[in-house]
Image (cartoon, helix red, strand yellow):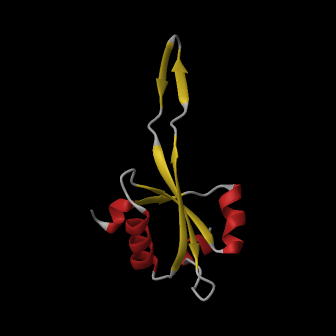
Amino acid sequence: MNKYDIIRKPIVTEKSMEDMENKKYTFEVDKNATKIEIKAAVEEIFNVKVKKINTMNMQGKLKRQGAHMGRRPSWKKAIVKLTDDSEPIEFFESI
């Protein structure tokens, strides 16, 4: 699996922006990616040192259109904590 296939996109919310002060960054990742693969991908793409990774499977929201019910696809979220001596991820600094 390619490192760019593992890290799909950053998640930009109020809570994730507050966590950036503690060097925590949030990403949507591939559902089948492990913590080891996520760590290797983040370290290689952004040239940082990762201390810890928390992952969680997010359930897709229920949606309806008229009488029909459906569900958005489920996805996986990873919160990446960087080491104290690591530089911040520059991508998030411009937001």
> x, y (%) of residue 43?
44, 78
In the displayed structure image, the side of residue 92 where residue 47 appears, left or right: left
In the displayed structure image, the side of residue 24 where residue 71 appears, left or right: left
Residue at left offset 47%, top offset 23%: 70
Specify whether residue 94 is in view.
Answer: no
Specify whether residue 2 is in view.
Answer: yes
Vertical comparison of 79 with 82: above or below? above
**Residue closest to the far bottom:** 85
When asked about the image quadrant of residue 80, the answer is bottom right
Vertical comparison of 34 with 50: above or below? above
> x, y (%) of residue 17?
68, 63
Residue at left offset 50%, top offset 82%: 49
**Residue closest to the far top:** 67
In this figure, what is the number of numbered marks?
Answer: 0
Image quadrant containing the C terminus: bottom right
Judging depth in this view, the residue of 65 and 34 nearest the camera is: 34
Vertical comparison of 13 with 21: above or below? above
Vertical comparison of 58 with 66: above or below? below
Residue at left offset 55%, top offset 71%: 52
When asked about the image quadrant of residue 35, the answer is bottom left
Judging depth in this view, the residue of 16 and 76 nearest the camera is: 76
> x, y (%) of residue 42?
44, 72
